[in-house]
Amino acid sequence: MRSNRAAVRAGVSMAATLPLLAGALALGIPAAQAATNPGARDAIQGTKPLWATAKADQGAAQDSSKISARVYLAGRDAAGLAAYAKAVSDPQSASYGKYLTARQAQQRFGATGQQVAEVTSWLKSAGLTITGTSRHYVSVTGDVAAAEKAFGTQLHNFRKGGKTYRAPEATASAPASLNGAVLTVTGLDNAPHKAEHDDELPPPDAVFHNAGPFSSYYGSKTADSLPEAYGTKIPYAVKGYTGEQLRAAYGAGTLSGKGVKVAITDAYASPTIASDAATYASRNGDAAYRSGQLTQVLPGQYTHTEECGAAGWYGEETLDVEAVHAVAPAADITYVGASSCYDDDLLDSLGKIVDGHLADIVSNSWGDIEANQTPSLAAAYDQIFKLGAVEGIGFYFSSGDNGDEVANTGTKQVDVPANSAWVTAVGGTSLAVGKGDTYQWETGWGTEKAMLSADGKSWTDFPGAFTSGAGGGTSRTVHQPFYQRGVVPDSLAEANGSARMRTVPDIAAVADPNTGFLVGQTQTFPDGSLKYDEYRIGGTSLAAPVIAGVQALAQQARQAHGGGPIGFANPAIYARYGSPVYHDVTDRPTGRDLAVARVDFANSFDAADGLLTSVRSLGKDSSLTAVRGYDDVTGVGTPGPGYVYSYGY
């Protein structure tokens, strides 16, 4: 996984089809036959990565090599879980909004004590050591030989992306006598499954200043001394929008998010988040935090801190917390930090929210490319999302910051977990908020950058190269969910073949760092001192918490009229498609191409090493385009007038 602040990077590799209502477990032999055929095995589909091909095979892994794996539990009724998650989320269903408590969800769909005991006994009998047990999985360690015995497959070494990784030579399996208790297993392959944190800005542990000049609102200061772009003088980039401007743009009215709980997940935790958030609120007109309004749920210890760049995640938490509070200043915020940037640890954070029902709305500003996600991990994530749905919890994921990913990976693809049919994928826009906090327009977020020539009279190679943009497109692994039928054009849904597939994003909000949000954080200055400072930032890491804040406002309005949590919002979001509650975003909202001028310090701090002046074109998102109707940059659009009051009561 990786963070989606400003512009991010990714890696390479795999895919497999995961229908919306299908579990990851395919029963190779009916469980009823297990008694008469004690050696019968059930295939655990999705456990052999597609990159583990015969051509890439480098031979058997050493029997003594160590592994660490998780066996995820299917629970009492995996098919029933998916069906109920759909029913309670669909406004057309008689069960809409009839959520279960966390305890009821566990009792109805969770693993039984007997299932856990039988899975544990099987793993121990193969020679594996049990290292932990949760409601969702049994974790084990051991050597390759024991893993091969347990899962009925050989582990080989395979070449992948110029490196060698271990993976199953064939699909893993479990004893049929377990009667489908195993959902999936992760850890049999040892390719990296973690977040990569790479922002457009320097790491937040080193100070970053925006140079200016700035616009205080869009268009307030024109770059008269700079060359024209697209036949006209252009404005300077905004200093950074504040909560007052974002609330006005997305129709917050007098709502504050009172009575609503929002959770945020990231890796690690900023040691200065409480003071930074309080300082930011007081300096920028947001309501002061009440006692206990901002809380953290943190692991006992952190791991992989150097590998994951732990300090780089501090700014992620800061952005998410301050953006949610700016939009929904009375909402309670719980930050749930993962012990590392690895998928297993991020899954644990999501699991804590579901198991304890810590919030109704969950903002997640991290992700990776679809090619890096194995079907086994997708199954583990989807089970958490479905459990959340039956409890009335909605998960919001940023769609990514590299557009169609071609410039980044060479392959057109979407990001994960935003591709899941059970989450709301949040795309990005460039936002113009004018004088008096008036909404002017939005374009899809996609930036092309050209530098000022040495003589200052022209832009070099105008409009320049693509630098970053909102992620979107068509999944190769997830079939089209029911709520997208009749809304997503077949030209998008069938972009990868004849089958209709999941298309992202679902909804959008401001993300362009050139029309971004002002954030405040303690940073390290050149003299080594730690000081609070403010800077402008963007990315779909901004869009996700902004939408989470907007949803908190909508839930407050719903609860004021006797309604319950919004829950998994996609069916309701698509039910409003084409209505005035959305801004229908296009790339040329004024009828012409748009751009802003931006001035940066060469050393990211002061003018000692000079200034860098550039023109940033708006609405230029790789091969993705924002058009009338649904599109793969902004989904159904952005929240407009009346959106927060549009959810049924």
Image (spheres, helix red, strand yellow):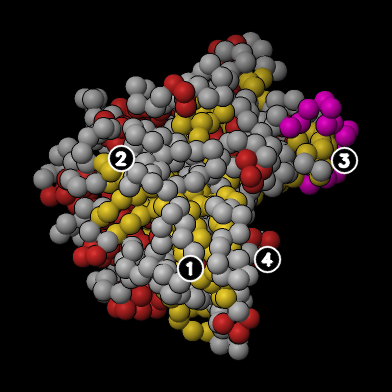
Q: Mark 3 or mark 4, which is nearer the start of the sequence?
A: 3
- Point out the stretch of residues depicted in magenta: 51-66
Question: Disc 2 to disc 1, how far (Cα)?
Answer: 32 Å
In the structure shown, which secondary structural element does the residue marked by tag 4 occupy?
A: helix
Out of 573 and 120, give the one closest to the viewer: 573
Corner quadrant of residue 7: bottom right
Percent position (x, y) of residue 344?
58, 48
In the picture provided, is 85 more to the left or to the right than 98? right
In the structure shown, which secondary structural element does the residue marked by tag 1 occupy?
A: loop
- Predominant SS along the magenta part: loop
Q: Amino acid at mark 4?
A: Glu
The local crowd at label 1, few if under 14, some if 14 to 19, many if 20 or more residues have their Cα within 10 Å, is some
Marks 1, 3: nearer the viewer: 1
In the structure shown, which secondary structural element does the residue marked by tag 2 occupy?
A: loop
Is residue 606 in view? yes
Residue 62 is labelled as 3
* Tag 2 residue: 584
Corner quadrant of residue 476: top right
Question: Disc 1 to disc 3, how far (Cα)?
Answer: 64 Å
Q: Amino acid at mark 1?
A: Leu
Residue at left 22%, top 35%? 579
Marks 4, 1: nearer the viewer: 1
* Tag 1 residue: 226
Residue 306 is labelled as 4
Out of 152 and 209, give the one closest to the viewer: 209
